[in-house]
Image: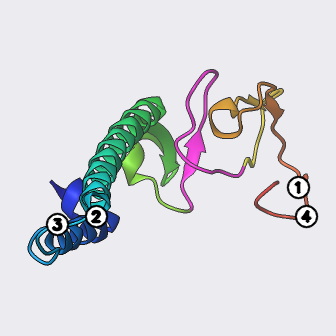
Amino acid sequence: MGYIFGGFGTLLLGAAIMTMIAWKPLGGAHPPASVLALAIVLFVVNAFSACFNAWQDWSTSRVMASISGMLPSEVTVIRDGARISIPATELVPGDLVHVSLGQKMAADMRTIKLDGELKFDRSVLTGESDAITGSVDKTDDNYLES
């Protein structure tokens, strides 16, 4: 019901009701059929708009659920010199995260030490199929790109 009575739907519904009032009660003995047609069109547009908005919300919730499934539930961090496993939601700025081969990344992180070559698959975020090489050095002047 929120799709019909919320936002733009309220405006369409109000216009349709006012058009219906202009057609019959205020239209005289022989009201023009075009006024009735306009009211019907406004009701239909409101219904299509509500259906489209509901479908869009459903589709978005499916995408968000699939992305949420890609996030790791736990991460290994180094706190107070000890490796501990914590829920990914408890990560805080400044945590040292230990990343193993094939592990999903829980957040944006800066690499401070590498053992060998590091590549990131960010195809879900960027759409690029090529893996991106990781480095401890700055690769771009823009810190968001480095």
Residue at x 81% of width, y 55% of height: 145
Q: From the top left corner, tell me how far across and down residue 20 is, in percent.
A: 17, 66
> Could you say which disc has been placed on residue 30 in the image?
3
Q: Which residue matches tag 4?
A: 141
Q: Amino acid at mark 1?
A: Lys
Q: Which residue matches tag 2?
A: 35
Q: From the top left corner, tell me how far across and down residue 75 is, in percent.
A: 46, 38
Q: CA distance from mark 1 to mark 3?
A: 78 Å
> Could you say which disc has been placed on residue 138 in the image?
1
| 2 vs 1, front mark | 2
Q: CA distance from mark 2 to mark 1?
A: 67 Å
**Dot 1 or dot 3, earlier in sequence:** 3
The magenta span reads 94-110
Q: CA distance from mark 3 to mark 2?
A: 11 Å
Q: From the top left corner, tell me how far across and down residue 84 is, in percent.
A: 42, 40
Q: Is residue 135 left or right of residue 122?
A: right
Q: Amino acid at mark 3?
A: His
